[in-house]
Image: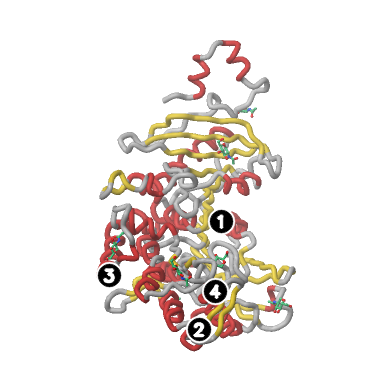
Amino acid sequence: MVLKSQLLLLLPSPVLSALIAPTASNCTASALLTPSIPGASILIVDAYESTLESTAISFCNVTLTYTHPGQNDLVKVWLGLPSTWNGRFEGVGGGGWVTGFPSEMVPAISQGYAAVSTDGGHDALSQATDSWALLSPGNVNLYALQNFASVALNDMTVLGKQLTEAYYGKAITKSYWSGCSTGGRQGLMMAQRYPDAYDGILAQAPGVSWAEFIPTMFWPQWIMHEIGYFPPQCELDTITAAATSACDELDGLKDDVIGLTGLCTFDPSTVVGQPYACSNVTGTISKEAAEIAKLTWTGATNAVGKLQWPGIAPGSPFSGIAGTTCDSSGGNCTGLPFAITTEWHRLFIQKNPGFDPYNYTQTGWDAAFHASIQEYTSIIGTSDPDLSEFKSSGGKMITWHGMADQLIPFNGTVSYYEHVLSLDANATDFYRFYSAPGVEHCRGGAGAAPTDPLAALVSWVEDDEVPQTLAASRTVNGTIWKQELCLYPLSSIYKGGDPAVASSYQCE
Ligand SMILES: *[C@@H]1O[C@H](CO)[C@@H](O)[C@H](O)[C@H]1NC(C)=O
Ligand SMILES: *[C@@H]1O[C@H](CO)[C@@H](O)[C@H](O)[C@H]1NC(C)=O
Ligand SMILES: *[C@@H]1O[C@H](CO)[C@@H](O)[C@H](O)[C@H]1NC(C)=O
Ligand SMILES: *[C@@H]1O[C@H](CO)[C@@H](O)[C@H](O)[C@H]1NC(C)=O
Ligand SMILES: *[C@@H]1O[C@H](CO)[C@@H](O)[C@H](O)[C@H]1NC(C)=O
Ligand SMILES: *[C@@H]1O[C@H](CO)[C@@H](O)[C@H](O)[C@H]1NC(C)=O
Ligand SMILES: *[C@@H]1O[C@H](CO)[C@@H](O)[C@H](O)[C@H]1NC(C)=O
Ligand SMILES: *[C@@H]1O[C@H](CO)[C@@H](O)[C@H](O)[C@H]1NC(C)=O
């Protein structure tokens, strides 16, 4: 273990005096406590005074590097300690294969939170998944997967809390988790596996049931291969537009948003033969494309037609999991799968970097889906509906999910929440799930996205203000429209009046 403080002792004294800041600061490796956690060995502590570029807010930027002896890993924890501290602590989640991001800590630090995040032992922003997923063909790097899934998240929380309290010389008042997608899944992991870690958890558009939804993200690609047709994106986009126009007004308002996806019975076969036209491609909608759209919405099914995992809802862009790319004439289209699902099949299920998931037979597809659940649910499934320990530790959790999510099907989160409610009919006392009509993955889309869900969570945790709805807004033709997101299973229905004001909608 080499601490910066120990390095300093080795330096000649003129160099040493130049390195020590003239004004006493606690933001140095030597002034900081060296944190400790069972099972880990701290290797490097680094700390320096810094300022957030956008806001000129000053903070102490701490980086810890540690290993779990015997696991051959090297994990980084980033901690930001603002000079004006609000007494709270925030764990910041990642996205995709990224365990955590320093950049996502900026909003928390600028609001006065002590914020922590981690690289989870692999640098997913600059390293290909192939570089860490396998130890050798056939052998998954399970310790790396476990760090990404759970262990590094608890480590950063324990280490970050120790350093925060020592630095300020005061106890943390409340701790929060915030993340979307992988960060949302991580929030649920904290509630399920480390129920005392956080007082409040914001688990947005969570990648719950990873072992099921990640492999089935390949379903539309496999279907296109089976049908033998990869439609130009324009053809699929035209089907989305037709579905939106058919189902838009079920919620009372024509706004390019399908608010009631469950009631949308639009059948793509009704638009076969209708023209589509984009800047570089024109044609008429084929029965193949209609079938691909229908099967993408239904979701993956096995050899006897049983649903494996729900599909994305009508109105969601097809480009996320049913992406294709064509030559400039619009011909010779090929599939453009979402990278993580291909990697999951190649590296984690088949453990063979050269495997091509387009090559599955239905039997092979079903076996792969089963293997994924068998091997990985306990590591990264994050679908345990038993939140009783989180409840008894006094935790509160908020989830919202965009109904037009093009990557993680909205209905998967519905299914998790319903399991939680079936175990504890009073679960809304501590866990609330809101649907966001027309919102895509974490953000984007024509619908209203939550404006400050973390603030709603803080009010719930600290002031017992139960969030009946979640404030949201969208920009429509240059003006801001406000709307409240409803607690599932309620839906936001337009009741007349100015569509820009929240009181024109009701949860029913
Ligand atoms: C350093 O921390 C101590 C308490 O731990 C505090 O009294 C002192 O004011 C701090 N110094 C600076 C420069 O923040
Ligand atoms: C803290 O420092 C590390 C290492 O220099 C850097 O990567 C990170 O972006 C910094 N954190 C913030 C919040 O600026
Ligand atoms: C936005 O403006 C366009 C063009 O005037 C109009 O067709 C559309 O209906 C407007 N959108 C909404 C949601 O009102
Ligand atoms: C989602 O679930 C609802 C209610 O069970 C159902 O009506 C709807 O068809 C499902 N949608 C998808 C895309 O699976
Ligand atoms: C049309 O142009 C876009 C953007 O350059 C490209 O991504 C697409 O593959 C092209 N062809 C079709 C059929 O959409
Ligand atoms: C598809 O690619 C092949 C080989 O590159 C070419 O001969 C053919 O003309 C292309 N077809 C279309 C429709 O562009
Ligand atoms: C996929 O299947 C085809 C035909 O069965 C075979 O030629 C090809 O080698 C397979 N590709 C991979 C990557 O397994
Ligand atoms: C739910 O809460 C009500 C009122 O607090 C209580 O009477 C009931 O027993 C609780 N039900 C369960 C299943 O915990």
- Determine if residue 112 is in view: yes
Alpha carbon separation for disc pair 3 and 1 = 50 Å
N-terminal of the pair, mark 3 or mark 2, is 2
Q: Amino acid at mark 4?
A: Cys
Q: Which mark is residue 461?
A: 1
The residue drawn where x is 54% and y is 81% is 243
From the viewer's perspective, is the residue at label 4 or at label 3 nearer?
4
N-terminal of the pair, mark 4 or mark 3, is 4
> Height in image: 405 above or below 355?
below
The residue drawn where x is 53% and y is 53% is 178
Alpha carbon separation for disc pair 4 and 3 = 28 Å
* Badge 4 residue CB within 8 Å of ligand 5: yes
From the viewer's perspective, is the residue at label 3 or at label 2 nearer?
3
Q: Is residue 277 left or right of residue 504?
A: left
Residue 109 locus on image (x, y percent) = 62, 44
| Quadrant in which residue 73 is drawn | top left
The secondary element bearing badge 4 is classed as helix
Residue 422 locus on image (x, y percent) = 39, 71
The secondary element bearing badge 1 is classed as helix
Residue 289 locus on image (x, y percent) = 45, 79
Density class for disc 2 (Cα within 10 Å; few <14, some 14-19, many ≥20) is few
Q: Which mark is residue 234?
A: 4
Q: Amino acid at mark 2?
A: Leu
| Residue on which the image places disc 3 | 361
| Residue on which the image places disc 2 | 263
